[in-house]
Amino acid sequence: ALNFLGHFHLAQELLPELKKSQVPRVVFVNAEQHIVETSVDPHFVYSGRIAAFAAYHKSKLALLWYAHKLARLHPEICVVSLKPDTIKSRSGEARGVIERSIVSIFSPFFLSQEQGLHIAIHCSTLPKLERGRYYYEVRGMTSFSPISRDAHKADESYELACSLCKIALERGR
């Protein structure tokens, strides 16, 4: 839940300052793994052998829904999402033997942490950025999955997050 609700709550708290900015922008870091999901459990409880993966994938889908909702509610704010490609990190260390083996096989294809920052810096500083887009380190701009563009699901996810974070629901668009 933190992987989504933390970003949601921070962005909501920053809205008054963003609205005062000359060039308001919100950049969400996402991942392609959202494409394997179609829903988010309202209690953010996942169980089973792959619970951690499911939770991560669902949090990324919820974050995309929020990015779309935020862009609709606040067209004056440039809201974009980015996928920095696969970055070498220590996240594989706490996993089981199989997961560590997979990470070790594919790690030569991962970007360094410095290389992975490139797209985030690009999206954070480029003067003219197409709002509502999904930027990807390797391919430039990429398409969202169809489910991530579902306005009804985005609205439901937004209402749930407002309720969980005790934030007043903003209506519109």
Image: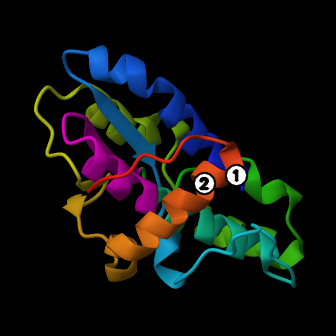
Q: Is residue 13 above or below residue 172?
A: above
* Quarter of the image that includes the C terminus: bottom left
Q: Which residues are magenta?
A: 64-83
Q: Residue type at mark 1? A: Leu
- Whether residue 85 is visible, yes or no, is no
Tell me the number on the disc at residue 87: none
Residue 38, how many percent across, how many down?
Answer: 52, 84
Q: Please indicate whether residue 91 sits to the left or right of residue 25 in the image.
A: right
- Whether residue 22 is visible, yes or no, is yes
Q: Is residue 166 above or below residue 91?
A: above
List the residue tagged with mark 1. 164
**Count of residue discs:** 2
Q: Residues within 10 Å of mark 2 (few under 14, many from 20)?
A: many
Q: Residue furthest left?
A: 128
Q: Please indicate whether residue 126 sits to the left or right of residue 121 in the image.
A: left
Residue 86, how many percent across, how many down?
Answer: 51, 58
Mark 2 in CB contact with mark 1 (< 8 angstroms):
yes
List the residue tagged with mark 2. 161
